[in-house]
Amino acid sequence: MAWLRSDRIVSGLRRRFGISAPKLAVRTHWSWRVKGAIIGVVLLVLAGLFYGGFDAGRIFAGFNVGKVKEEQDRLANELRALKNENELLKRDNIELTNSSQMAIGARDVLSKQIVALQAENTQLKEETAFFEKLLGSATAGKNGLAVQRLQAERETIDSYRFRALVVQGNAEAPFKGRLTLTATLITESNKRVTLNLPDEQADLLPSLGLDFKTYQRVEGLIKVPANAQLKTLVVRVVPNGSPTPKTQQSLQL
């Protein structure tokens, strides 16, 4: 071939005349930005292949992400429904508890009212029987008047409180008059003192007035020397316009 012979001739001339040149190698230079981009692309491809293979492996093994998500949503809905039902049950329980407490409270109130009414009924029966007895004794007594339930007790160191019940039996007209009291005391110095009331204590007069047809309760405060002891109390029933008592009652202490 002609071109082969030409190359040989040229090579021979170069060797003969000492003409020679080193061989040159041309290499392509890549910048760091290009290298980084290439590496990034490679990594993305590898990551995609990894996750794709991972999902494919899960699907192949029977694990379906979509079905799992649906199951999670279903369970979440059921949980919300159970929470709502639980709240409703709690409210119902509170309402039932309140209703039960109200019923118990109402029952207790009714029970107390029944007990109070029974006690009041018993007291009324006792008082009715007592007044019937009093009226009977008053009718049998002189002028149909009687002093009952005479009591006296210390109120303070210098006073006594007295109570009395004046009754009148088979009366056609109201009785009008007053009470007079005689109190016998022993002072701290062992001295006997007698008080005529209301003459010696005018402020006691309003509580001693009488105006009744069947009965009247009388109550008042007797002032005494400090620490004096009340020994006897005599109560007299005096009609208006007359100094003579119709009846009287004594109390020994």
Image (tube, rainbow, N blue to C red):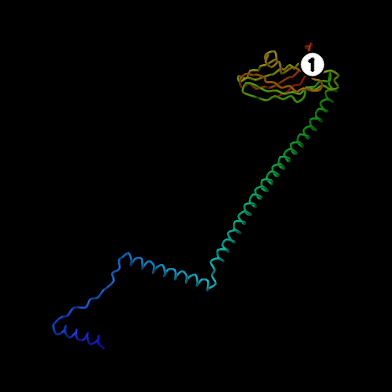
Please determine whether, in this image, residue 17 is positioned above or below residue 227. below
Q: Quadrant of residue 238?
A: top right
Q: Residue furthest bottom?
A: 1
Give residue 98's position: percent from left, percent from top. 66, 45
Looking at the image, residue 130 sits to the left or right of residue 26; the answer is right
- Residue 50, horizontal then vertical, whole percent: 44, 70
Residue named by callout 1: 176
Please state if 251 lies on the left or on the right of 172 as rendered: left
> Which quadrant: the N terminus?
bottom left
Tell me the SS state at disc 1.
Answer: strand
Q: Residue at x 29, y 71 (%)?
A: 28
Name the quarter where the C terminus is drawn: top right
Is 107 situated above or below 215?
A: below
Kind of residue at disc 1: Lys
Residue 232 in which image quadrant = top right
Q: Report the number of numbered marks.
A: 1
Task: Please report the residue visible at 74 percent of the width from the left and 36 percent of the height from the top.
Answer: 116
Q: Is residue 247 above or below residue 116?
A: above
Q: Nearer the viewer, residue 155 or 89?
A: 89
For the view shown, which residue lies furthest in the front direction? 2
**Image position, residue 144 (x, y; %):** 84, 20
Which of 2/44 is in front?
Answer: 2
Estimate how packed mark 1 is, as few (under 14), some (14 to 19) or many (20 or more) residues with alpha carbons within 10 Å.
some
Q: Position of residue 215 (x, y in %)?
A: 79, 23
The residue closer to the viewer here, 251 or 11, is 11
Left or right: 29, with 152 as reference point: left
Question: Looking at the rendering, which quadrant does residue 79 occupy?
Answer: bottom right
